[in-house]
Image (cartoon, rainbow, N blue to C red):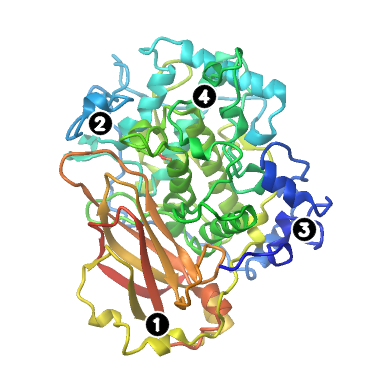
Amino acid sequence: MASLNLSTLPTTSLSSRTRSPFASKTTTHRFKVSCNAAGNEDHLPKLNMQNVDRRNLLLGLGGLYGAANLTTIGSAGAYPITAPDDISDCVAATQGVQDPDNAVRGVACCPPPSTSVPKPYVLPEFTELRIRPAAHRLTPEYLAKYKAAIAAMKALPDTHPHSWKQQGKIHCAYCNGAYSQVMNGHPELKLQVHNSSLFFPFHRWYLYFYERILGKLINDPTFGLPYWNWDNPTGMMLPAMFEEPGPNGNPRTNPLFDAFRDVSHLPPAIIDLNNRDDNAGANCVDQISANLSTVYSQMVTNSPTTSDFFGTNPDPKVTPKVGSIESGAHTAVHIWVGNPRMPNREDLGNFYSAGYDPAFYVHHSNVDRMWQIWRDINPYTNLDPTDDDWLNASYVFYDENEELVRVYNRDCVDIHKMGYDFENSRLPWLQSRPTPRVKASNIAAKSIGVVKKVEEIKFPLKLDQTVKVLVKRPERKRNAHSKKKATEMLFLNGIKYNGEVFFKLDVLVDDVDDGVETTPASSEFAGTFSMVPHNHGGDKMLMTSGAAFGITQLLEDLEAEDDEYVLVTLVPRAGAEDASVSEIKIQLVPTA
Ligand code: C2O
């Protein structure tokens, strides 16, 4: 895409030229500071969600919606995922791993044994909320506290449930097949918290205990885990604290240091929230703009309903669908930080090793924050799941008192009851709706006869190269009333891909082939499906998932609302040799 100049960029991230509720009163060279030293300093005013009239947010996103309804996810078939009572019912994740001896983090992920069954966890009383600060804005005192806590964790013996190693293993255990679904009567099925609606609640609980353990280690019950503010230009690089030198001027003496990171992505490299392999030369302005639009698409356009944001419940009878943030910015940060020279892209680039890098928890603190913000964006439509399978899903952790406890999704929907909140930070992405490259191109109609229609295609459709397909819309020329009642969504169902490698697929809509790159800053870029590898090894492990992309706004912006068909372009970007999709369709999905 042509390089942008400042005046065409979403304004709120940049300067005070506009008078949006989020605009800052800073000078116009603010943006340069963000580009050269994102995260090193931040004089930007904070957005205080409490002080923002919610109607502003709602209107900004296309008007008020009707009253809330109950929302369900997937099928409710009394199938809540339940971690085993007996944690010795855990096997090393070595099964099928090609070279377990050389997996640097080891694949024995089971927790320390316990003689008791997990007690149902009761949220404790507290007197002061733990406020999670933005990582790039920590005061020296706070940073010292955080480092002391991590150092204390690293000093514990490996066998201690609070040790750095045991905390890291938790992630491996819950996603690399250490537990089975024995409590559901399916010992043959593995327990997995990714690629589903368990993603947000599992990680919320995981961080909850991690934070309380850190607080206990430094005797400060008000300690809040910092969040990596990657959705704000000032936070769009690995927080400097992770790489700064420790006591002897050596980064290795910094407790936050991790040896397994991509050295070409250390500060001040600006993060790419879309993992475009080919954008090494992208200038900082374009990169920040693309990042903001990426977050906008995942938080707004592609998550109008509960299941689009959360994904579906794991259920053997239901084809899984992944949530927009999980398969988008969340994966991108993992892959961006992990070291591509390591066999499994350790640490962050693979689930088995991710929990060993302190940056993992700070990344997930922001993912957790995204859940909270998504609810605040539109409290009428953006609702947590309410079906029993989701509410009753449960996991087992050692709490900060080394007590084995069982926790439920239903008890983690209110962060204030859990005793924490986030320091405010501006949300410039809320006004970074992508803009069209080519308006009224009529490209779908022009492609008839050249590109196949969905009904002429034999599924499953291979995704080992770029494919174009015409998809018929259920309704044309939708009026305001119809748009208010339902969102038009493009579904890719039954996406099969090799779970051992990083897989990424970009989805473009009505994209005109004119030799110009379509980035996430363009309306034509409907979204991305990408997954962190799982390291199961052995035979290629084909995973199944699905994704949905909102196209109501996109078609408005492209002036294509009268079209009968849309032209869908699927661009495999990584790990797609064995990938395929079994269904492509457009449907109107009722808003709550
Ligand atoms: Cu459990 Cu970011 O993954």
User: Gap in Å between the C-alphas at discs 3 and 4?
Assistant: 38 Å
Sequence-wise, the earlier of marks 1 and 2 is: 2
Report the residue marked by disc 3. 21
Check mark 4 vs ligand 1: CB closer than 8 Å? yes or no.
no
Sequence-wise, the earlier of marks 3 and 4 is: 3
Q: Identify the mark at residue 178; answer none if there is no mark.
A: 2
Give the secondary structure at mark 2. loop
Label 4 with label 1: CB-CB less than 8 Å: no
Q: Position of residue 277 (x, y in %)?
A: 44, 53
Check mark 1 vs ligand 1: CB closer than 8 Å? yes or no.
no
**Which residue sits at x=71%, y=23%?**
140
User: Gap in Å between the C-alphas at discs 2 and 3?
Assistant: 48 Å
In the current view of this chain or complex, which residue is farthest to the front? Answer: 281
In which quadrant of the rendered image does the N terminus lie? Answer: bottom right
Sequence-wise, the earlier of marks 4 and 1 is: 4
Give the secondary structure at mark 4. loop
Label 3 with label 1: CB-CB less than 8 Å: no
Q: Is residue 404 visible?
A: no
Report the residue marked by disc 4. 257
Report the residue marked by disc 1. 474
Give the quadrant of ligand 1: top left
